[in-house]
Amino acid sequence: MTALADRLEHKNRAVPYAQIASIRTQREEGAGSSMSYLMISTATGRICKIDRSTIVNEPLLLNFLSQRLPA
């Protein structure tokens, strides 16, 4: 995942900050394991599901996004 000046890129898909509708976390539990995801919903209804364990510095990323997302 890469945070650029005007958009967020994940797996070669660009999501402009103006199109991000919401960001939330989701936990899924299965047979003896659990996964935590960052769910990014866009204004067009698309959802990007990102494994939180792959985000290098999640608190910094969330702070960065909160400053760039529309109110």
Image (spheres, rainbow, N blue to C red):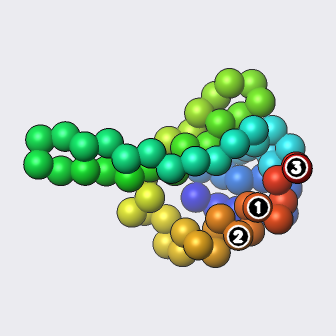
Name the image quarter holding residue 1. Answer: bottom right
User: Decide: marks 2, 1 in contact (CB < 8 A)?
Assistant: yes
Q: Position of residue 31 (x, y in %)?
A: 12, 41
Q: Position of residue 8 (x, y in %)?
A: 71, 53
Q: CA distance from mark 2 to mark 1?
A: 5 Å
User: Decide: marks 3, 1 in contact (CB < 8 A)?
Assistant: no
Q: Residue furthest top?
A: 45
Q: Is residue 37 above or below residue 57?
A: above
Disc 3 designates what residue?
70
Q: Position of residue 35 (x, y in %)?
A: 31, 50
Q: Is residue 39 above or below residue 6?
A: above
Residue 33 in sight here = yes
Q: Secondary structure at mark 2?
A: helix
Residue 63 bears which disc, if any? 2
Residue in the image at 57% along x and 39% along y: 48
Disc 1 designates what residue?
66
- Looking at the rendered structure, the kind of residue marked 2 is Asn
Q: Is residue 44 left or right of residue 31?
A: right
Q: CA distance from mark 3 to mark 2?
A: 13 Å
Q: Is residue 29 left or right of residue 69?
A: left
User: Decide: marks 3, 2 in contact (CB < 8 A)?
Assistant: no
Residue in the image at 68% along x and 24% along y: 45
Q: Is residue 14 above or below residue 44?
A: below
Q: Is residue 47 left or right of residue 51?
A: right
